[in-house]
Amino acid sequence: MKKYIIIGGSGFVGSNLLKELKAENCANIDKKDSLEYNEITVKCDIRDTYCLDKVIHPAVAVVLLAAEHRDDVSPISLYYDVNVQGTKNVLHAMDHKGIKNILFTSSVAVYGLNKDNPSETHPADPFNHYGKSKWQAEEVLRNWYDQNPEKRSLTIIRPTVIFGERNRGNVFNLLKQIASGRFLMIGKGQNKKSMAYVGNVAAFIKHCIQTQKPGYRVFNYVDKPDFNMNELVAQVEVSLNKKLPSVRIPYSIGKAGSLFFDLLAKVTNKPLAISLVRVKKFCATTQFDATSAHSSDFIAPFTLAEGLNRTLHYEFLDKNKDQITFESE
């Protein structure tokens, strides 16, 4: 029997969490094999209640990372089948095995776009199905906790966009464009972008599970201080010792152009790097308050600039990197 059960540990955050925990006293449950920790991995889809009940065993705590999170999930019902019903299935299996502690990774997507630096008490206003399904999953978890608050423990972490070495998501695509010298700024570049380095996110999850006790906690996780897009580009220039073009495209033109790429993606049935959703995300202010996380006796191992520098050097300068990559948003 393992002390911690990580559900979804084969992914980007999960692999870094298992590394942070040194995989000691951990079991990984995932629908995919683990590229690094397959010896402690059992394959199971959280939509499969029979499988979950079979593979989940008594443990100190469950860390639920598994989720449908990409922009282009089809059919849309998958967001709810996995993120909401899957959470119910995990809780049912936990109850059956007497597990009373869970840490759930939600998302700042529950707040919606262009909010004014929301803290954990800000009203939910998700703008897409991912955010809506994460909020519904949170409600399921809070209802479970409220049924026995004196004995149960629930920690919810709402990370902002996560980046790091070997990730192949939106941040990597952006950094790759900037590093290539073919990047063109859309808008004025003054919009703030809260970000989180995966090494810090994994360390914070570890901190939370090791300090869990009966009760309810919710944290935004962001590495501070926030960069705006101009500052992010400047950090890339410093890390890679490269001067980048200063050409800018007005937001209205960028939006109009993205509609063409959406049409092309529909015709070819292939996802493209540029879309209306991604242009809106790029130009939106996505700034979140993380005072609670950073006043909880947690000390982030890396600054935001250090995380970016490590990622940029690994991806674009190092010659001896491994071939392991993770697909995400």
Image (tube, rainbow, N blue to C red):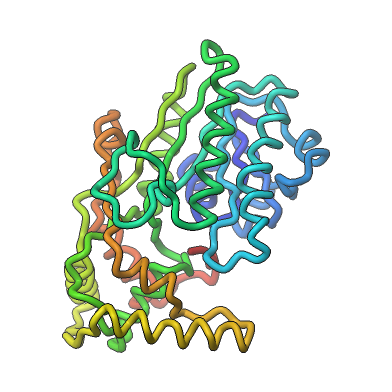
Position in image of residue 261 (x %, y %): 48, 85
Q: How many marks?
A: 0
Residue at the image point whose x is 60% and y is 28% from the top: 3
Q: Nearer the viewer, residue 285 or 323?
A: 285
Q: Quadrant of residue 210?
A: top left
Position in image of residue 63 (x %, y %): 56, 37
Q: Quadrant of residue 53?
A: top right
Residue at the image point whose x is 52% and y is 63% from the top: 328
Position in image of residue 171 (x %, y %): 38, 67
**Is the residue 112 above or below the residue 257 in the image?**
above
Q: Quadrant of the N terminus?
A: top right
**Is the residue 16 above or below the residue 313 in the image?**
above
Is residue 302 visible in the rendered structure shown here?
no
Q: Residue furthest top?
A: 150
Q: Is residue 253 left or right of residue 28?
A: left
Q: Nearer the viewer, residue 77 or 306?
A: 77
Is residue 137 visible in the rendered structure shown here?
yes
Q: Nearer the viewer, residue 297 or 265?
A: 265
Residue at the image point whose x is 30% and y is 79% from the top: 178
Q: Nearer the viewer, residue 222 or 109?
A: 109
**Is the residue 327 above or below the residue 181 in the image?**
above
Q: Is residue 190 left or right of residue 148?
A: left
Position in image of residue 134 (x %, y %): 52, 46
**Is the residue 103 above or below the residue 280 in the image?**
above
